[in-house]
Amino acid sequence: MKHSAAEILREYGPFPGVDTVHGVSFDGRNVWFASGEKLNAFDPESGQALRSIDVAAHAGTAYDGRHFFQLAGDRIQKIDPDTGKVLASIPAPGGGRDSGLTWAEGTLWVGQYRERKIHQIDPETGAVLRTIESNRFVTGVTWVDGELWHATWEGEQSDLRRVDPQTGKVLEKLDMPAGMGVSGLESDGGERLFCGSVSAGVVRAVRRPR
């Protein structure tokens, strides 16, 4: 297993009216993050806040190229990004104990926080297709270049880890600096992993190793 310190590239925020970042996503241009009762967008190049959608946004956020999927209590809501309208809803596998959310290969991947699990689910029905286990609390998930990454936060320490999507075996681990807990995770498809923060209401970009 490769093991190294996380390289923080940039910190965005704090954003006005945002105390906690619950989930992070990327639409190909802008970063979106959940802050409780809103989904908020900012430009990752300038750091400028752009717009927000009034919708329940309690944990992980995902984007499939057309719609957002947002954890809200014990449901995952499908949202039109233009209007903010909730188009559909499916049960979340953790029944409200869910954390990270990401889209990959036509399915959703959902972190189940204290149960230390990641579920692959059907985005139409919520049916669980596969489950892998971690040995730490799962707080964010993302896919990039065929790699599954997830964030952990337990005992005041967070790390980002690349794992085997079949077995959950840890292949690579990046340790976050002390005090920087990660509450959501998303890739930009390139070298950046965007990490949410509960304590500071900011989003940090971490370099993804190549």
Image (tube, helix red, strand yellow):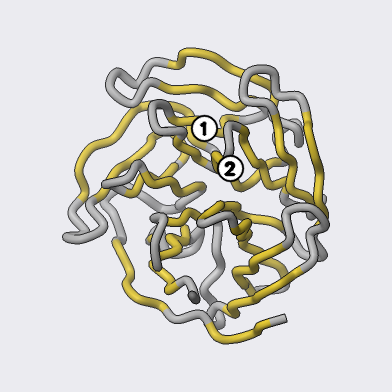
Question: Is 140 placed above or below 191 here?
Answer: above
Q: Which amino acid does label 2 sit on?
A: Leu
Is residue 59 visible to the viewer in this orientation of the structure? Answer: no
Where is residue 176? Give x, y as percent: 55, 77
Residue at (42%, 26%) from the top-left corner?
Answer: 67
Nearer to the camera, 163 or 73? 163
Q: In this view, does 170 lie to the left or right of 8?
A: right
Where is residue 134? Give x, y as percent: 79, 60
Question: Is 37 placed above or below 99 here?
Answer: above
Residue at (71%, 72%) from the top-left corner?
Answer: 171
Q: In this view, does 148 lie to the left or right of 46?
A: right
Where is residue 103? Give x, y as percent: 54, 39
Q: Quadrant of residue 1?
A: bottom right
Residue at (50%, 22%) from the top-left corner?
Answer: 78
Q: Classify 10 Å Cα crowding around label 2: few (below 14), some (14-19), many (20 and above).
A: many
Return the residue at label 1: 70
Q: Is mark 1 on a helix, strand or loop?
A: strand
Q: In which quarter of the image is residue 181?
A: bottom right
Q: Is residue 63 left or right of residue 165?
A: left
Q: What residue type is labelled 1?
A: Gln
Return the residue at label 2: 101
Question: Is 173 placed above or below 26 here?
Answer: below
Specify which label sits upstream in the sequence, 2 or 1: 1
| Residue found at the very far bottom of the displayed protein | 4
Counting every numbered tag in the picture gives: 2
Residue at (69%, 18%) from the top-left corner?
Answer: 125
Where is residue 52? Give x, y as percent: 28, 35
Nearer to the camera, 161 or 97? 161
Q: Classify 10 Å Cα crowding around label 1: few (below 14), some (14-19), many (20 and above).
A: many
Q: Distance between the residues labelled 2 and 1?
A: 8 Å
State yes or no: discs 2 and 1 in contact (Cβ < 8 Å): yes
Is residue 68 visible to the viewer in this orientation of the structure? Answer: yes
